[in-house]
Amino acid sequence: KQWYQRRVAITAGIITITGYQANAEQARDAIMKIVAELEERISDTVEIDSRVHARLIGQHGKRIRKIMDKFGVDIKFSGGETGNTVTIEGNEENVEDCKEHLLELAEEYMDAVLERLEFQAEMSQYSRPEPQPGFFVRDAPWQQAPQPQVAPDTSDMSAFPDLGSNTTAPSHSVSGSWGGNKRWR
């Protein structure tokens, strides 16, 4: 193939092959084979529910690449109006076989999706209901409008009975954890 790349020139849709006659004819035949394969390619679309696209594609595209290699086709998932359009390109027989295979897989995967939705709907009846208010407290302190805060009158000693007297606090003897007595006044 590298030999062909060096001795094949394409200008304005004309392919010029230079080299020995046998090699040039071999290159021409290989090019004509590729052209014939490209002319046989068709494109077909199929509608597959977008909920199963991820399963068809597989992790990192492994599953869809395996399908494309198996059938020798190119598969493209497009959004379209509904987001369900899948385009398959290749020769006619392979496209039809691949289309049937994809529809079978999609049906199988869709059954699994529907089973899961049914299971979730069934389990939702056992889930906790939304919390309902149990009771209502009327005229609670936190519901009342805040009262303006007023500084206490320090000239009136009756508001502070302990601050105005000269009484001594009783002394208590406390034994510390390291021994010895400590006096607190």
Image (tube, rainbow, N blue to C red):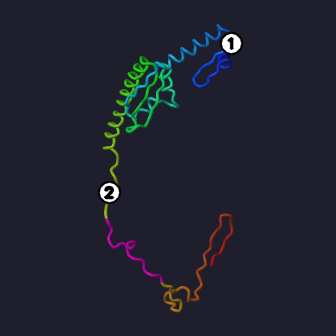
For mark 1, give the secondary structure.
loop
**Residue pointed to by mark 2:** 132
Q: Residue at x 39, y 73 (%)?
A: 141
Image coords of residue 133 (percent x, y): 32, 60
CA gap, disc 1 and disc 2: 88 Å
Q: Quadrant of residue 120?
A: top left
The quarter in which the C terminus is drawn is bottom right
Mark 1 or mark 2, earlier in chain? 1
Nearest the viewer among 55 and 5 is 5
Circles 1, 2 touching at the beta carbon (< 8 Å): no
Residue 15 falls inside the magenta stretch: no
- Closest to the observer, 179 or 102: 102
Which percent across, then down, holds residue 29? 57, 11
Q: Main secondary structure of the magenta part?
A: loop
Say few, some or many: other residues with alpha carbon within 10 Å of mark 2 (under 14 / 14 to 19 / 20 or more).
Answer: few
Q: On screen, 124 above or below 134?
A: above
As drawn, 153 above or below 118: below
Q: Taking 147 as reference, is 172 left or right? A: right
Residue 26 placement, left or right of 88: right
Specify start and end residues of the magenta stretch as a single range.
136-149
Residue 184 in the image, given as x and y percentages of width and height: 63, 76
Q: Which quarter of the figure is the N terminus placed in?
A: top right
On the image, numbered disc 1 is attached to which residue?
19
Q: Amino acid at mark 1?
A: Gly
Mark 2, secondary structure of its residue: loop
Type of amino acid at the residue the image marks with label 2: Gln
Residue at the (50%, 86%) spot, across then down? 152
Judge whether 126 appears above or below 100 on screen. Answer: below
Horizontal side of residue 37 vs 111, given as left or right: right
> How many numbered markers are drawn?
2
Question: Where 126 falls versus 148 (above or below)?
Answer: above
Mark 1 or 2: in front is 1
